[in-house]
Image (spheres, helix red, strand yellow):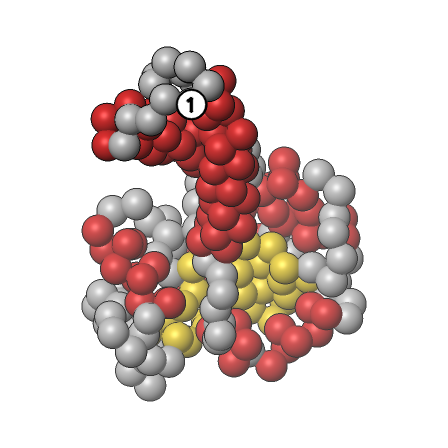
Amino acid sequence: MNPKELISFVADYFPMLVRKPAPKYVSESGNRVYGMVAEFHETPKIYHAAEIVRDAGYSKWDVHTPFPIHDMETAMGIKTTKLPLMAGGAAITGVIIAILLQWGTTAYLYPTVVQGKPFEAWEPFVPIMFELGVLLTAFMCIFGMLALNGLPRFHHPLFSHERFYKVSDDRFFIAIESTDPKFDPSETRALLEKAGGTGIALIEDED
């Protein structure tokens, strides 16, 4: 994530504190362009369209459906999530903090003889090592998942598109963001038309 993407990411969470970078595209009304959306009516069509967008090299886009579609992540080319690595790192961090906290306290800050055991005996440390490791892992899983999914978000530009509300009923949508390096209004529209999309529209992101 480059600095510009990071600022935009933070601005989605704290729009009152951070302004988004200057947009690459603006609409005729002067608003920044969020991206382009296309509508599809059948499951096989949205699946095939996702493959076309993936093969075209787009990286910042998403598929919205009224129900889960089997193997859609393959059609979109989604890579394995980084959350397990983040959770593992949190677990290791928790264990290390627990060891340092207990070892530093019992061996250096407040050395106390307990049942004749050495000050640096590690066996009594195990319960706290386990508890703190599990605690930080749980927090990382929750907050890491929310961050990777861009949540919570109180408003999304797609909500301004009236037809998008059909996604909770019987319609399927592909949305390609304007921040994608390959995004071009004309070429992206042509690609979505080739993929069989209808109701293709440019979505504005009002500040």
Residue occupying the far bottom of the picture = 29
149 displayed left or right of 14 = right
- Measuring from the top left, give residue 43's x and y in whole percent: 76, 53
Q: Residue at x 52, y 80 (%)?
A: 160
Q: Residue at x 34, y 18 (%)?
A: 119
- Measuring from the top left, give residue 28's x and y in whole percent: 33, 82
Q: Which residue is drawn at 60% across and 81% down?
A: 162
Mark 1 falls on what kind of element? Answer: loop
Vertical side of 132 occupied by 7: above or below: below
The mark total stands at 1
Quadrant, the N terminus: top left
* Between 186 and 160, the one nearer to me in the picture: 160
- Measuring from the top left, give residue 27's x and y in whole percent: 34, 77
Residue 173 in sight in this render: yes
Give the amino acid type for the residue marked by disc 1 in the picture.
Val
162 displayed left or right of 25 = right
Q: In which quarter of the image is residue 118?
A: top left
Quadrant, the C terminus: bottom left
Q: Which residue is drawn at 58% across and 42% down?
A: 76
Q: In which quarter of the image is residue 86?
A: top left
> Could you classify mark 1 by the number of other residues whose Cα lies within 10 Å: few (under 14), some (14-19), or many (20 or more)?
few
Q: In which quarter of the image is residue 165?
A: bottom right
Circle 1 residue: 114
Residue 186 in sight in this render: no
